[in-house]
Image (cartoon, coloured by chain):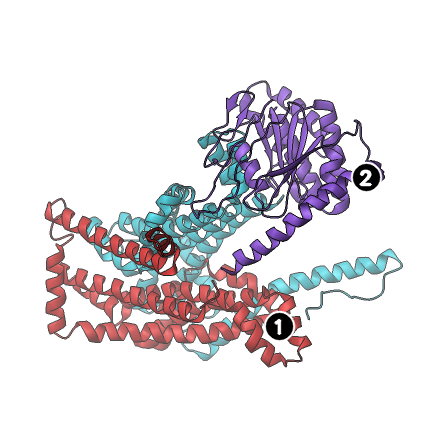
Chain colours: A cyan, B purple, C red
Amino acid sequence: MNDPTGSAGDAPSDVRASDIRARQDDVATISQMLIVPILGVAVWYVLSWTVFVVPAPHEAVRALVTDLGKGQYRSDLLRTLVKIMVAFSAAAILGIVIGTFLGLAKPLREALAPLVLITNGIPKIVLYPILLIVFGLGSISQITMGIIFGTLPVLVNLMSALASMRPVYRKVARMLEVGPVRALFRVYMPAVAPLLMVALQLGFSLSVLGVVYAELIASRDGLGQRLIQTYTIGNYDEMAASSLAILFIALGGTGLLRLVERSIVRHR
Amino acid sequence: MRGIFKSFRTKARTVIALAGIDFTAAKGSFVSIIGPSGCGKSTLLACVGGMERPTAGQITVDGRVVTGPSRRLGYVFQEESVFPWRTALGNVLFALEDQGGSKNDQIDNARSMLRLVGLQGFENAYPSEMSGGMKQRVAIARVLAAEPEVVLMDEPFGALDQQTRLMVGEQVLRIWEETHQTILFVTHDIQEAILLSNEVVVLSARPARILERVTVPFPHPREASLAGTHEFADIAARLWHTLSGEAKKAFIENEAGAAQ
Amino acid sequence: MTVSTMMIRLRTSQWWTRGVKTGGYVATVVAVAAVWALVTDAGWISDQTVPKLPDIVDAIGTLASAGEVWPNLASTLFRILLSFAIGVTVGIASGGALWRFPRAGGAIRPYLSAIYSVPLVVFYPIFLVVFGLNDWPVVVLTAVITTIPICLNTYLGLQSAPQVLINVGKSLERTSAQIFRQILLPAAWPAVLAGMRLSVVYGVAGVVSLEFVAAQTGVGNRIQYYYETFDVPSMYAFIILTLLLAGGCVGLVLAVEVLTMRGRR
């Protein structure tokens, strides 16, 4: 079915042949990795030629670079970034704390499971107008929206990870008379660390989503607001530029978290 | 050390796992517990270790009643119990970390435990780099590091292949010959039971009671070649005879239980 | 049968567990409503911020008689169902295609997972530009959003089908199409369902939030409208209606799950 890269047949009798084969493998892997982005950019170009209003990739990049030179733009970018960081930090803490309690305490979890599931299923964006009424158009509304978006994935995933942790770890902790606090930090958290990282990645991307959505709908400042503004004015190059900027923030943050995840999983 | 067990009834589903177990193990003895599958030998061990509460009856170890798990009731689990995020040394250290003493002393202690189980040189290996037998040995080392009064082993070699079982089994024998701790060893392997222990306790099918207690008279130190001798075969045959009747009963009951 | 046997039979039966679960949901909703009533009655929060429950119910009534409720609900529901339908079909098809061509699958899969981290909403203005101010931007973007979890889950589900099952099919001389339909798809179905559960939540959220920005009809648009005209009870009315709609959609997927997974659990 899936034939592995590299030949399946004869054993190389001299070192050079296997070296070449290894290098071929490397090239194959790298080219495999790059195919999708290259194709993606190519499709973008085609779209920009066929559809009048879609700007070409290089035009978008140029607009972004120009924008980054403007102080006002940079301050908007920074504001969005700060909102995201604050929202994510709070969401992570909330999600971890609540997720830990629910994950480890079965009766609590079963009692609150309906609440968690319901909260998970509702379109949380509908709460934004309420936030606007309470907090106004300022950053707090967008940050709160980011927190609401980001807490749930962390909570639910951590809860599920702890609940399905191998029971033998708890037994070992009990047998060795490890106190609850020490057990939490030295046994349970390390046991679910890889899943926790995945949960945090999801939480981050959702915090970004929450903040950006909120800025799109109604905000005083930020990249999301710029996005809508440039659309309304018809400045499509800058619109694409801001989209790119948001994408980079999202991918960058998730990428960093993924690096952390890699280092944790390395030995397992 | 006297372990006194009485009758138990576990699970409110009115499944009687253990019905009237009375037993005393002499201090420093190596006792194996065998019985047909699902007869409750693991449940019994769990009660001794404090992992489960007997519905009725009491277990005392050295005069103190067992109310819950503790370090003095060292427990080696059947499933893999080493922490994958720590090295072998780290795993053994875990048992020593909150017990006081300088860090260096703890490390030395951990190292000697690993040497005891034959893993010297593998201190910095992670469980992902180790075989099943090695991981169980780390688990044993971790348990021993806590200096338990009794060592409880629940089919510790269940997941290992035949050869590894023999080798790790011999290792356990050597450790016991050196430390002479009281060991309760649950297994389904008759040969293993005879080879390693002084006394073999045979449990019946569910609801379990003690069918027979057989003393294994061979002197220590023992070799694996013991399994080829006549005396060994006699004991094995006797135990096998007792067990096979029970095993059939247990098999039928299990099938019926699964179908419900 | 003694009473105690009956009690045990009852407590371990499926209906009891289902009853307890439903009871949990009902209890939660009641609890939330109770807290709401408490907080608003005690006057801790001003009426302008969070109206009392009866006021909201009144508003729903007024809106209903004004003919506002059903058309907007229908509009939103239509968009949700359309996007979801597209998402499911394209998702399963593409997931199957990725599995069928493992080289492509291997290359694309990390990017699929990466797209999860991207707020696809940033493409909304671009879609608005391309498609104009109608239903298409919302539906297309939401369709993309719903396709991804299903595609990924279908791909992973098919991959995780134990090879032994396929071998059974081959030894019984089934064709590839038959193996796919009769063995692989059922084996991958739980994963596909999990993807659908995720997708429906993203789908509802996607449609509703996009309606906030540039739609003429739909519940999201109404919430935005009543926010801007400071008609707070009506705004809350539509928020509650949206939550009910979301619940209905999730319930739909759960129903599919229950119907198709009989006997498996």
Q: Amino acid at mark 1?
A: Phe
Q: For label 2, count other residues whose C-alpha is less than 10 Å away and answer few (under 14), some (14-19) or many (20+).
A: some
Is residue C181 visible in the rendered structure shown here? yes
- Percent from the top left, x then y, of residue C179? 60, 77
**Residue at position x 36%, y 74% in the image:** C139
Q: Is residue C84 above or below residue B212?
A: below
Choose between A257 and C93: the one closer to the eye: C93
Q: Nearer the viewer, residue C228 or B83?
A: B83
Amino acid carrying label 2: it is Ala
For numbered disc 2, what is the local secondary structure?
helix
Nearer to us in this view, A256 or C99 = C99
Residue that numbered label 2 is attached to: B227
Q: Which residue does the image show at 49% across and 39% down from the upper left?
A: A188
Chain of the residue displaying label 1: C
User: Are the residues under badges 1 and 2 in a single subunit?
Assistant: no
Q: Count the marks: how many?
A: 2
In the rendered view, does B231 fall on the left or right side of A246?
A: right
Closest to the camera, between mark 1 and mark 2, is 2
The residue that appears at 49% across and 37% down in the rendered structure is: B8
**Which residue is label 1 attached to?**
C101
Hey, which quadrant is residue C83 in on the image?
A: bottom left
Outermost residue to the top: B101
Q: Position of residue C38 (x, y in %)?
A: 14, 47
Disc number placed over residue C145 in the picture, else none:
none
Residue B119 seen by the camera = no
Could you tell whether B171 is left or right of C67 in the image? right
| Circles 1 and 2: CB atoms closer than 8 Å | no
Chain bearing tag 2 is B
Whether residue B251 sits left or right of residue C149 in the image: it is right
Given the current orientation, which residue lies at the most extreme right position?
Answer: A13
